[in-house]
Image (cartoon, rainbow, N blue to C red):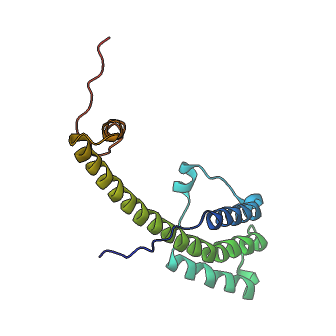
Amino acid sequence: MKHERHREAVPADVVQQILEKIDECTALLQPYLLGLSPEERRSLGKMGDKSLAFVTKVHEYAHSNPQLVPAFSDVRAFDADYQDATGLQEIDKKIAQLKRGVEDIAMQAGAEAMEFSRLFYLNAQTASRANVPMAAPVVSDLKERFPYNKRRTPPESA
C-alpha cells in the first residue's frame, strides 16, 4: 500500500527544536544512565507483562506484609527499582512510538528521494547519449555513486 506523502519537508527549525528537547531529556536522565555493556544487557533478566504483574503484586504484598520481607533485603531499594521499572515504561513506549514515526518519515522520504535520483540519473544517461551539453560530466560523476551499478572498475595494477 503506497502512502501519499505530504510535499512539505519537516522544517529545519522543527528538527532543531526536537534535537534540543532530546538533549534536554538526556540531560535530565544523565545522572541515572548506566551504560550497560552488551554482555551485561544479555545477562540481565527481562521484565515482560507477566513479570510486571508478578512484581507489582510482590510490591503490594511487601508493603502490606512487612513480616514476609527477607531480613537481608532492602525494601527501599526494591521501591526504587519498582518505580523505575514501571515508571520508565511509559517513557520507553512513547519513545518507541516516536522512533517508529521518525523511521517511517525517513524511510518514505528516502525511498522517494532515491526514486527521483534514479529517474534523474537515467534521464541524464539518455541526455548524455543524445549529446546534451553538461550531461556527460553529470553522468560520469553520478555513475561512481549509483547504488545499482553492477559493474565495478577493476583495481589498477601496481
Q: Is residue 47 visible?
A: no
The residue under the point 47% across, 68% down is: 105
> In this view of the protein, which residue sits in the foreground, 144 or 78?
144
Whether residue 142 sits left or right of residue 102 in the image: it is: left
Residue 101 in picture, x, y percent from top left: 49, 71
Residue 59 in picture, x, y percent from top left: 67, 81
> In this view of the protein, which residue sits in the foreground, 65 or 47?
47
Specify the farthest residue to the bottom.
64
The residue under the point 70% across, 66% down is: 21
Q: Is residue 93 visible?
A: yes
Whether residue 128 sits left or right of residue 78 in the image: it is: left
Q: Quadrant of the C terminus?
A: top left
Residue 82 placement: quadrant: bottom right
> In this view of the protein, which residue sits in the foreground, 40 or 61?
40
> In this view of the protein, which residue sits in the foreground, 134 or 118?
134
Specify the farthest residue to the top.
158
The total of numbered circles placed on residues is 0
Residue 87 placement: quadrant: bottom right
Residue 30 in picture, x, y percent from top left: 74, 58
- Does 36 sit above or below residue 71? above
Residue 27 in picture, x, y percent from top left: 75, 60
Whether residue 77 sits left or right of residue 136 in the image: it is: right
- Does 75 sit above or below residue 110? below
Whether residue 88 sits left or right of residue 54 in the image: it is: right
